[in-house]
């Protein structure tokens, strides 16, 4: 069994599942309503919904004969908190780093080269 964070990111990797989550931001939806805008079978949509539910990103509830889907923001919140941990570092200026290395290497090679005879 994968850790919960890996399961969330695996579920988010698919563009169809991300589109479904965007739809559920508005309101709870019946499975048939979720499937409507997609060019795929209801069975295929159901598999996507199962993946989202397994990741904890949505919940499903049967109301009569209709299955309703609801966004569950806690799983996204945990992923967001994890990603924000990387925001504490300043972005690296690779051009400045390259210039620094060139200067350091040029100085090092100048110091190591033998002195020219007089």
Image: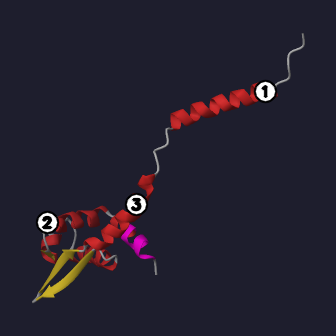
Compared to residue 22, the image places residue 50 above or below, namely: below
Label 1 vs 2, first from the N-terminus: 2
- Distance, label 2 to label 3, CA atoms, is 24 Å
Q: Mark 2 sits on what residue?
A: 26
Q: Position of residue 56 (x, y in %)?
A: 31, 77
Mark 3 vs 1: CB contact within 8 A: no
Of 5 and 36, which appears nearest the observer? 5
The count of marks equals 3
Pick out the residue farthest to the right: 117
In magenta stretch: residue 61: no
- Give the spatial CA distance, label 1 vs label 2: 66 Å
Which mark sits nearer the N-terminus, 2 or 3? 2
Q: Position of residue 21 (x, y in %)?
A: 23, 67
Of all residues, the one furthest to the left in this rendering is: 64
Residue 33 occupies which quadrant of the picture?
A: bottom left
Residue stretch rendered in magenta on the structure: 3-9
Left or right of 85 in this view: 11: left
- Give the number of the disc on residue 111: 1
Q: Residue at x 46, y 44 (%)?
A: 91
Visual colour scheme: secondary structure
Q: Is residue 110 left or right of residue 76?
A: right
* Label at residue 83: 3
Label 1: state its secondary structure.
helix
Q: CA distance from mark 3 to mark 1?
A: 44 Å
Q: Nearer the viewer, mark 1 or mark 2?
A: 1
Determine the residue positioned at 33% across, 64% down: 14
Percent of width and height locating residue 36: 14, 68
């Amino acid at each position: 069994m994968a850790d919960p964070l890996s399961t969330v990111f695996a579920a988010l990797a698919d563009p169809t599942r991300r589109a479904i989550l965007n739809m559920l931001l508005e309101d709870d939806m019946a499975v048939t309503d979720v499937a409507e805008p997609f060019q795929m079978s209801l069975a295929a949509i159901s598999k996507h919904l199962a993946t989202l539910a397994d990741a904890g990103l949505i919940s499903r509830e049967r109301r009569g004969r209709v299955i309703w889907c609801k966004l569950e923001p806690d799983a996204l919140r945990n992923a967001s908190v994890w990603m924000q941990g990387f925001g504490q570092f300043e972005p690296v200026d690779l051009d400045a780093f390259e210039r620094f290395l060139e200067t350091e290497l040029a100085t090092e090679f100048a110091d190591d080269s033998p002195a020219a005879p007089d």
